[in-house]
Amino acid sequence: MTRAHTRNLIRQVAQACDPEAALLLYDRSIASGQKRIALLRYLDARDLSVPLTPQHHAYARAVASVLSERDIETIAREALRRSRERHASLALKRTG
């Protein structure tokens, strides 16, 4: 996956609340062995009601088990911020 493709998927998740894009990003993070960003993308996928497999959940649990509480808090705060922004943007689109 190219950086341009990744940026496009990130945009789709942020602006269009695209669950397929969220899943692709999370799968890419897993394949790349990422930790922090993978956990953030897992939370994004959950927020967008992506149907996740047991393997998806297991990877997130494994990542969380090696991160500090502070790291997990930071990631959770960022996921919440992103969720609020996504949902606010979606609400604006519906009313605008």
Image (cartoon, grey):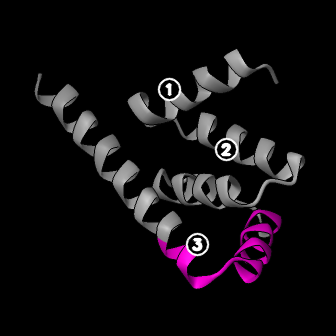
Image coordinates of residue 84 in percent, x first then y, are 29, 51
The label on residue 71 is 3
Which of disc 1 and disc 2 is earlier in sequence?
Answer: 1
Give residue 36's quadrant in the image.
Answer: bottom right
| Front tag of 3 and 2 | 3
User: In this image, 84 relative to 30: left or right?
Assistant: left
Amino acid type at circle 3 is Asp
SS assignment at label 1 = helix
Image coordinates of residue 57 in percent, x first then y, are 72, 70
Residue under numbered circle 2 = 23
Residue under numbered circle 1 = 11
Question: Which range of residues does the magenta coloring cover?
Answer: 55-73
Q: Is residue 39 visible?
A: yes
Q: CA distance from mark 2 to mark 1?
A: 13 Å
Above or below for 55 versus 40: below
Give residue 58's quadrant in the image.
Answer: bottom right
Which residue sits at x=70%, y=48%?
26
